[in-house]
Amino acid sequence: MMIFEDRQEAGRLLAEKLEKFRDEHPVILALPRGGLSVGLEIAKALDAPLDVVLVRKIGMPGHKELAAGAIVDGDEPELVLNEEIVRLYNIPARYLEDRKKQQLAEIERRRKLYLEGRPPLSVEGKTAIIVDDGIATGSTMRAAVHAIKRRKPKRVVVAVPIAPAETIKKLTQEADEVVCLDTEVVPENRTCC
């Protein structure tokens, strides 16, 4: 497993792999909180604007870190479920709806905190690079990819320092490209640093 000194180092290493997108004038979209430190380094290295994608995980009952799905902000907030987890653990629809409402309230709180009333940056016709500090099941990132695709970018690239190989394989079916520095097995609540 690759060990990073901190999220900034992980961001700088990812930026090297993303250099090929510099001439496309990408928009870097970070998932708060951990993804912001990583995304900031990428944005600085590529001289690209940085924005946030507000996504909240919906953990399964009794095990909040295992994602049953995720909700993502937007004109039409979108719930992306991890159907395998929902089915395997027989998670009730009422539970998911209650958690969706809670997480939408948290997204609204974070929107005020991070965006201070500013609208999201446009990604229409541009390369959107979605960044986080690590992925486990991929539900949160999948939700982000779905939401960003609705905003009509030219291309969607996912960039993370660490994620399980199986999750990366699934994400390559949804994003145009996935850049990951390490595909070792990731403990459930482990991020890069």
Image (tube, rainbow, N blue to C red):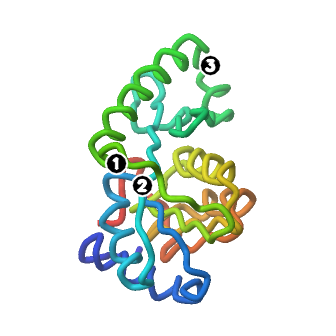
Real-space Cα separation, disc 3 to disc 2, in angstroms:
32 Å
Give 100 or 128, whichever is nearer the viewer: 128
Circle nearer the viewer, 1 or 2: 1
* SS class, disc 3: loop
- Mark 3: few, some, or many residues within 10 Å (few <14, many ≥20)? few
| Residue 2 tag number | none
**Residue marked by disc 3:** 90
Residue 40, position in %: x, y?
34, 71
Q: Are marks 1 and 2 in contact (CB under 8 Å)?
A: yes
Q: Earlier in the sequence, mark 1 or mark 3?
A: 3
Residue 4 to residue 51: above or below: below
Q: Which quadrant, please, contains the N terminus?
A: bottom left
Q: Secondary structure at mark 2?
A: strand
Mark linked to residue 115: 1
Query: Alpha-carbon neighbours of circle 2 within 10 Å: few (<14), some, or many (≥20)?
Result: many
Q: Nearer the viewer, residue 25 or 37?
A: 25
Crowd class of label 1 (few under 14; some 14 to 19; many from 20; radius 10 Å): few
Q: CA distance from mark 1 to mark 3?
A: 37 Å
Relative to 3, residue 94 above or below: above
Q: Quadrant of the C terminus?
A: bottom left
Which amino acid type is shown beneath numbered disc 2? Val
Q: Amino acid at mark 3?
A: Asn
Say which residue appears at 63% left-offset and 34% top-offset: 81
- The answer to which of marks 3 and 2 sits earlier in the sequence is 2
| Distance from Cα at disc 1 to Cα at disc 2 | 8 Å
Apparent side of residue 35 relative to residue 177 in the rendered image (left or right): left
The amino acid at mark 1 is: Leu
Q: Which numbered disc, 3 or 2, marks the residue closer to the eye?
A: 2
Q: Which mark is residue 52?
A: 2
